[in-house]
Image (cartoon, helix red, strand yellow):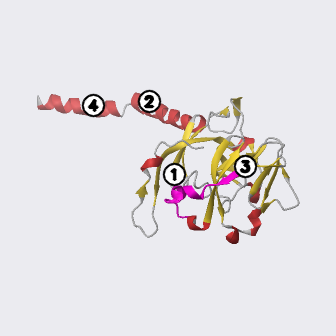
Amino acid sequence: MSEEKLENKENYKVDFFSFENIKSLFIMIIIIFIFRWSVAAPYHVPTASMEPTIKTGDRLLASKLTYDLKFPFTNISLMSLGQVKRGDIIVFSYPKDPSLDYVKRVVGLPGDHIKLEDGILYINEIAVERKSMNSHRSILDDITDLSDKKDLFQEDLGGVVHWTLYLKKNLSYLPKKSWPSSQDIYIVPEKSVVVFGDNRDNSSDSRVWGKVPLSLIKGKALFVLWSMYTKKGAFFPTLRFKRFGQKIY
């Protein structure tokens, strides 16, 4: 009996590492990679450029089927599924280094005339409506990027109402108060978009490095999977449970 049991165990080990099992595991891994490349993927946000909409430490889920279907493991579009809209928060390959992924908000579509003057965004010569929301500053309680030195606004991008942050006027950085300059406008090239961070005075975006070609867009940010940050002076990180599953606008 003991010899028979030992033989069965050895057979089990052989079966577990059999060619069929290894092949099934390999296929499953390929399917996971295809799903992440072509359907949806998680992204970690390590910077404050989109605060308070997206906070440092957020883990996002981005849909890769919002705009097109791409051939797995390439940027080749097989089928167009939708158009990029003003106000969308997109994940894209950084134009200066495509190995890096960025997340920003689309403010300019192909052919738009874009200008930022004294903190006011103009699209096709029309000022984008914004209003002060400093009475709702509790949303800034769990961010560490000089929140006490910033004014909170809500901006309306054609029906997409979202948060924006600006340094208080006496602290504003002159290079970003007006863009491209007080006398000029920026015309968005064909097959490209212009993107800004919602944290307007702490964002490397189109004002710094220019347009984002549509071919570099990977998907649209949908919601926060989970979020974690470290309070100033704290040793252990804190989970933001209220942000788990929160939709991104």
Which region of the structure is painted magenta?
Answer: 129-145
Residue shown at 77%/62% (left/top)? Answer: 118
| Residue at which label 2 appears | 24
User: Mark 1 or mark 2, which is nearer the start of the sequence?
Assistant: 2
User: Mark 2 or mark 4, which is nearer the start of the sequence?
Assistant: 4
| Residue at which label 1 appears | 58
Q: Which mark is residue 129?
A: 3
Indicate yes or no whether the magenta region holds residue 206.
no
Left or right: where 107 falls relative to 147: right
Q: Is residue 178 visible?
A: yes
Circle 2 or circle 1, nearest the eye: 1
| Numbered disc total | 4
Residue 40: x, y in percent?
Answer: 56, 37
Q: What's the distance in space between the residues labelled 2 and 1, CA to CA?
A: 33 Å
Q: Amino acid at mark 2?
A: Ser
Q: Is residue 46 visible?
A: no
